[in-house]
C-alpha cells in the first residue's frame, strides 16, 4: 500500500513538472509573437495580415485641394521630397471649359478627374529602380484627409508620349503624391514618396520674407510597406513584362499564397478563390513571356503583361485580406480535435474510476506470466491511475500544439479587431 502511494506521488510530481514546462513554453511563444512588430517582416518571408502603417510626409508647404479649388483655374505644383529633391511636376487645375496647359486636371462632374500630362512638365524624375529591386515605376495618388490613398494611374519616367489619365476620386478634399512602386496596379502606396502637392505661393513668400517653412501635416495609410531596397541591375526587357514578373512574385509570397497547404486540411472558399486568381495571373504571365520570346521588339507583350500584373495584385490583396481568417479557422479545427480527444479521455477515466479495483485481492501466485496481448495493450490506458493518465495526455504533442494554437488564434483575433 505504501509503495502504491509513493508511485502515485511520483506520478503527480511528473504531471506538475510537465504542466509547469507547458505553461512556460506557451508564455514564451505568446511573448515572442506579441513582440513582433505588425509591420516588420523579413525579406523573403511570407507577408502576413496586419501590415498596416501610417506614413508621415514630413515636408514643407504641403497643399490640400478641394473641389471648390477646381471651380476656377488653379496652378498646383508637385515638389520633390528628400528622396528626389530635383523632381518637379507642374499642374494646372481648372473647370471643364478646357485649357491649353501642358498638365491640367479638368473637373467634368463631381468625383471625376481628367488628367493630361505632357512630358515637358515632368522634370528630374529618374527611373524607379534607384530605390531598390522591388521598384519599377511611379504611381500618382489622390490622398484623402484621413489618409486613404486612391491609385490615379502610372507615371513612367521614360518615353516621350503624353500621359492621359481618366480617374475617379470620391474625396472632397485631397492632396496628390507620386510614389515608387513595383507595378502600376498596386492598391496601396509604398512609403517611397518622391513628389507631393505643394503651395508654391506660400513657399515663395516664405523664401522672400526669410521665414521658416511650415511643415505639411500630410500622412497616408498603407498595408504595403515591406519592400526590398537592395540594388539590382536593370534587365533588358519591356517595363510591362518586368512589372508583371514582380507582381506575380510579390503575390506568390503574400499571406496564404506563400504557405504550403496541409495534405488533409480542408480548403475554404476564400483560399480557393485566391489561389485560382494567382493561377490566372501566372497564365497571363506565361503568355507575355512567350510573346516576348518570339518577338522581343513587338508590342504584343504589353496586354498580357499588364493583365498579369493587374490580376496578380488582386490576388495579393485577397491573400493579405483572408489569411488571418483562414489561419484562425485552421487553429479552431485543431482545437476542436484536441477537445474531442480530451473529452474521450475524460470519459474513459470516468468509466475506469467507476469500476471496483481488484488489484488488492489478486493473488500474485495466480497471476499470468504470459506477455500481454493486443487486447491487454488496448486496455493498458484504462488500467493506469488518474495521475498517470493525465501525465500521458500532457505528454501528447497534439495537446501542446492545440494550446499554443489557441493562444495564437486569440492573439490574431485581437490584432485583427484593433486594425
Image: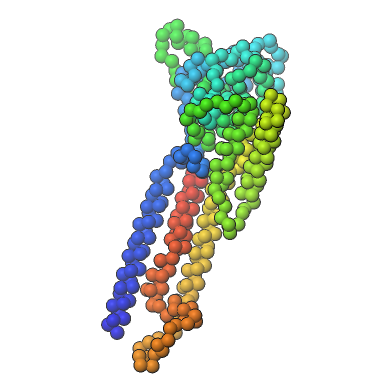
Q: Is residue 199 visible?
A: no
Task: Name the residue at 39% across, 56% down.
Answer: 26
Give the percent coordinates (x, y) of residue 342. 47, 68
Which residue is at the front of the view, 246 or 58?
246
Task: Name the residue at 37% across, 54% down.
Answer: 27
Taking 364 as reference, is 51 above or below it? above
Give the percent coordinates (x, y) of residue 168. 66, 27
From the viewer's perspective, is 66 left or right of 344?
right
Give the percent coordinates (x, y) of residue 186. 59, 32
Quarter of the image that includes the N terminus: bottom left
Which residue is at the front of the view, 354 or 292?
292
**Render colour scheme:** rainbow
Task: Name the residue at 50% across, 65% down.
Answer: 339
**Which residue is outermost to the front?**
294
Asked where in the image residue 262 lies, by quadrant, the reply is bottom right
From the viewer's perspective, is 202 left or right of 6?
right
Taking 270 as reference, is 123 above or below it? above
From the viewer's perspective, is 374 left or right of 155?
left
Total residue callouts: 0
Q: Is residue 19 visible?
A: yes
Taking 183 as reference, is 358 above or below it? below
Give the percent coordinates (x, y) of residue 279. 65, 43
Which residue is at the front of the view, 215 or 383?
383
Amino acid at each position: 500500500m505504501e509503495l502504491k502511494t509513493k508511485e502515485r506521488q511520483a506520478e503527480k510530481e511528473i504531471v506538475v513538472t510537465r504542466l509547469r514546462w507547458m505553461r512556460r513554453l506557451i508564455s514564451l511563444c505568446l511573448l515572442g509573437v506579441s513582440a513582433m512588430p505588425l509591420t516588420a517582416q523579413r525579406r523573403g518571408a511570407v507577408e502576413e495580415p496586419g501590415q498596416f502603417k501610417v506614413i508621415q510626409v514630413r515636408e514643407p508647404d504641403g497643399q490640400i485641394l478641394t473641389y471648390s479649388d477646381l471651380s476656377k483655374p488653379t496652378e498646383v505644383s508637385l515638389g520633390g521630397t528628400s528622396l528626389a529633391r530635383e523632381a518637379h511636376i507642374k499642374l494646372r487645375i481648372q473647370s471643364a471649359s478646357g485649357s491649353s496647359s501642358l498638365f491640367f486636371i479638368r473637373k467634368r462632374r463631381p468625383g471625376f478627374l481628367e488628367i493630361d500630362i505632357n512630358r515637358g512638365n515632368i522634370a528630374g524624375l529618374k527611373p524607379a529602380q534607384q530605390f531598390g529591386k522591388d521598384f519599377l515605376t511611379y504611381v500618382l495618388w489622390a490622398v484623402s484627409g484621413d489618409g486613404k490613398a486612391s491609385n490615379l494611374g502610372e507615371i513612367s519616367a521614360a518615353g516621350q508620349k503624353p500621359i492621359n489619365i481618366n480617374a475617379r476620386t470620391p474625396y472632397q478634399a485631397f492632396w496628390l503624391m507620386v510614389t515608387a512602386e513595383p507595378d502600376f496596379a498596386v492598391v496601396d502606396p509604398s512609403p517611397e514618396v518622391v513628389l507631393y502637392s505643394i503651395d508654391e505661393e506660400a513657399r515663395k513668400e516664405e523664401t522672400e520674407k526669410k521665414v521658416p517653412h511650415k511643415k505639411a501635416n500630410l500622412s497616408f495609410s498603407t498595408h504595403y510597406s515591406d519592400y526590398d531596397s537592395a540594388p539590382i541591375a536593370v534587365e533588358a526587357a519591356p517595363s510591362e513584362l518586368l512589372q508583371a514578373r514582380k507582381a506575380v512574385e510579390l503575390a506568390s509570397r503574400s499571406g496564404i499564397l506563400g504557405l504550403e497547404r496541409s495534405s488533409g486540411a480542408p480548403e475554404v472558399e476564400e483560399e480557393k478563390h485566391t489561389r485560382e486568381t494567382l493561377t490566372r495571373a501566372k497564365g497571363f504571365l506565361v503568355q507575355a513571356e512567350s510573346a516576348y520570346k518570339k518577338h522581343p521588339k513587338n508590342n504584343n507583350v504589353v496586354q498580357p503583361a499588364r493583365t498579369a500584373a493587374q490580376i496578380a495584385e488582386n490576388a495579393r490583396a485577397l491573400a493579405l485580406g483572408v489569411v488571418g481568417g483562414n489561419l484562425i479557422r485552421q487553429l479552431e479545427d485543431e482545437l476542436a480535435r484536441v477537445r474531442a480527444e480530451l473529452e474521450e479521455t475524460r470519459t474513459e477515466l470516468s468509466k475506469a474510476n467507476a469500476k471496483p479495483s481488484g488489484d488488492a485481492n489478486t493473488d500474485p501466485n495466480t497471476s499470468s506470466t504470459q506477455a500481454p496481448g493486443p487486447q491487454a495493450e488496448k486496455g493498458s490506458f484504462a488500467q493506469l491511475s488518474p495521475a498517470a493518465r493525465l501525465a500521458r495526455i500532457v505528454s501528447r504533442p497534439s495537446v501542446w500544439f492545440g494550446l499554443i494554437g489557441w493562444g495564437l488564434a486569440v492573439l490574431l483575433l485581437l490584432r485583427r479587431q484593433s486594425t
